[in-house]
Image (cartoon, grey):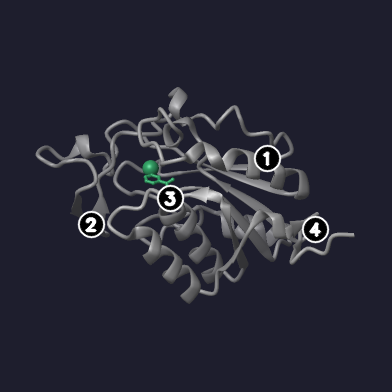
Amino acid sequence: MTSYALRATETDCLLVIDVQPDFLPGGALAVPDGDAVIAPINALGRLFRHVVLTQDWHPAGHASFVTSHPGKKPFETTALAYGEQVLWPEHCIQGTPGADLSPKLELPHAELIIRKGYRPGIDSYSAFREADRTTPTGLAGYLRERGFTRVFLCGVATDYCVGWSAIDAREAGFEAVVVEDACRAIDLDGSLERAWGDMAAAGVERERSGAIGG
Ligand code: VGL
Ligand code: ZN
């Protein structure tokens, strides 16, 4: 019998972050090697009874889009009311094919899809809290009411939506484990190293999918 470092239990939830065509190769904001997350996520999906997905879901003209800031270039930053905002290529516009959940995901038993980033003036990397750091998405209440105590995070991007979600999971009182081989990063100016440091400081664990059993 194999002995795993961690086992998925009834109080664990697999949180699959933003696996959408716009973040995968060929997409509007493609994460390098993003397709590599699909196989490990599908394998994790067979171990976890409880799965929640997130979907980045912006209205046209969203404040995080570089096209909403004349004179700016993609990946530059600007000051918004809540602080510094990276300006992204237009992506995950509500109702467009790039915003769908990837058809390559094999997670028919997922129990909730949480959409985020739908307020025109506020970005939302985290699945728990928007980028103003105050507006909740409702996910913490949902997980708590369902009796979950630990979330396993995977998807894209490690240094943005996965990382911020993991840190906010800790802040909301959940254990958080990032499954590193089931994530890929954007990595802008050292953002990946910074994200791992911030996650470690917040008490986020880091594990490989092969170390997780059902
Ligand atoms: C994300 C940038 C903009 C992500 C979403 O899913 O990490 N990154 N919107
Ligand atoms: Zn976005």
Residue lying furthest right: 1
List the residue tagged with mark 4: 10
Upstream in sequence: badge 3 or badge 2: 2
> Residue 195: x, y in percent?
41, 63
Secondary element under disc 4, as helix, strand or loop, is loop
Give the residue type at disc 4: Glu
Disc 2 target residue = 81
The alpha-carbon separation of the residues under discs 1 and 4 comes to: 19 Å
Q: Amino acid at mark 2?
A: Ala
Res. 79 image quadrant? bottom left
Q: Measure how far apart labels 3 and 1 are at the Cα level.
A: 19 Å
Disc on the earlier residue, 3 or 1: 1
Q: What is the C-alpha distance between the residues marked 2 and 4?
A: 41 Å
The mark found on residue 185 in the picture is 3
The residue that mark 1 highlights is 42
How far apart in space, not on screen, are marks 4 and 3 (Cα)? 29 Å
Q: Is residue 59 above or below residue 149?
A: above
Q: Quadrant of the C terminus?
A: bottom right
